[in-house]
Amino acid sequence: MPQAEESKASQVGRDYFWNTAASVMMSLATVILTVVVTRSAGLAAGGVFGLAYQAGQQFQPLGMYEVRPYQVTDLEHRFSFGTYLATRIVTVGLMILGIVGYAVLFGDMLLIILIASLRLFDAFEDVYVCEFQRAGRLDIGGQSWFWRSLTTVAAFSGMLIATGELLSSTVVTLAVSLVATVLLYVPRARGLFPQRPVWESRLIKELLIICLPLCLASFISMYLASAPRFSIKHYLDSTQQGYFTILFMPAMAINLLSIMVFRPLLTSMASLWVGADLPGFNRLIRRGLLVTVGAFVVVGAVTFLAGAPILGLVYGTDISMFRAELMVLVLGGAMNAASVVLYYALTTMRLQKLAFVGYALAAVAMTLMFVLLVPSQGLLGVSIAYTCGMGVLVLLFALFQQRAVATHSGEGHS
């Protein structure tokens, strides 16, 4: 193998390894934090923590503004990192305002604000991870992402186990995470790209306008993820909220397995699309969907055979009475992962508006099903409504993507 090709293959291997490690750590963070709270403070407290943490995730798209798929595919450097960084500072500020507004609406203001604010670091560091990927060094971004997530989990878990105080543990974790973010990203970016924010209002406004459909779509996608918890809060109780937090973990695993394989390929996907290599572009999408199917088969089989006992052992809670709900949610997780693959395809094709339309229609469908099913079917109704809503989203995205490819192919032959 020529030295250049060997070096490229080695870099791809490092990119995959650290992106995978960071993705696993990010997903495990939610699991570990929930387990620690549930075991230390009880099932109801775990439900409250899960709701507050999910609130932070709900507003995370506002902080990230879904610039990632645009930034990592901006191979012509239409915008500099300084513009992306300045824009991210603005959007993270908006995320903070959203969290505060949510806390005012739902009560328990201080605790909800602090717990939800743990997601601020996920939103901010993403702009650095994206730029490392655009610069061909996703491995550096993945390493920093991994160690920052691990630091947050370790600080929170250690404090909560030692003190039993949820509020003080969260405050300390926020401080530790801030220091870790600065130390892990700023020094390692030196020499690769300038880090000074570019406060040029015209460029920031242009970027915000371009990515607005993506932000709205992502915000609705987070609503789709959060809607089951909102419906449980409205129709059921905190104990059922705690059960759902446990039941949803295998669904999260499917999404993790799919994204950690597919996300490093985003820059390659952009190159194929810009180069008008439609067969290669379609092959990459099919690879992502096949990975999703494979993840569904593996996670589904494990969940069917031993999911309830394993989760019961981890969380110290018997969930054997929810086997049907568990399997329905696994299917919903597969639908969610497939929708993300197709969403990235639409974004690469610069069809942000169609992505927004798909999420909006799926949100309407899912909400209606919650209203119809949850009052009478409880958690099974929640599970069915979520899975059906994600199925609607996959169908719409697939139709949009295929139609766009056919149109592009026709234009190429005209």
Image: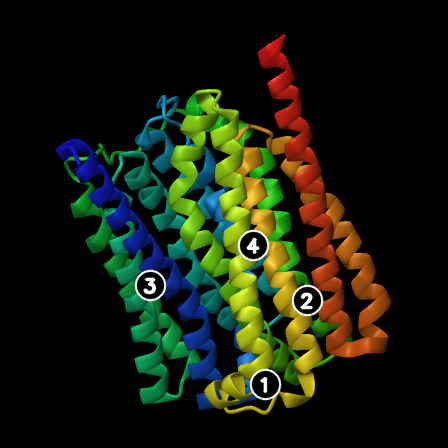
User: Which quarter shows the C terminus?
Assistant: top right
- Kind of residue indicated by mark 1: Ala
Regarding mark 3 in the picture, which secondary structure is present there? helix
Q: Nearer the viewer, residue 294 or 134?
A: 294
Q: Which mark is residue 284?
A: none
User: Which quarter shows the N terminus?
Assistant: top left
| Residue wearing tag 4 | 337
- Kind of residue indicated by mark 4: Ala
Tell me the crowding category of disc 1: few under 14, some 14 to 19, or many 20 or more residues within 10 angstroms, Cα based: some
Point out the frontmost of discs 1 and 4: 4
Which is nearer the N-term, disc 1 or disc 4?
A: 1
Point out the frontmost of discs 2 and 1: 2
Q: CA distance from mark 3 to mark 2?
A: 26 Å
Regarding mark 4 in the picture, which secondary structure is present there? helix
| Residue wearing tag 2 | 228
**Would residue 224 be found to the left or right of residue 384 on screen?**
left
Q: CA distance from mark 4 to mark 2?
A: 17 Å
Q: CA distance from mark 1 to mark 4?
A: 29 Å
**Would residue 251 be found to the left or right of residue 203 on screen?**
right
- Which residue shows up at 54% across the image and 83% down it? 306
| Residue wearing tag 3 | 149
**Would residue 274 be found to the left or right of residue 222 on screen?**
left
Regarding mark 2 in the picture, which secondary structure is present there? helix
| Residue wearing tag 1 | 44
Q: CA distance from mark 3 to mark 1?
A: 25 Å
Q: CA distance from mark 2 to mark 1?
A: 17 Å
Which is nearer the N-term, disc 3 or disc 2?
A: 3
- Which residue shows up at 55% across the image and 81% down it? 307
Q: Nearer the viewer, residue 247 or 89?
A: 247
Disc tally is 4
Horizontal and vertical percent position of residue 276:
49, 20
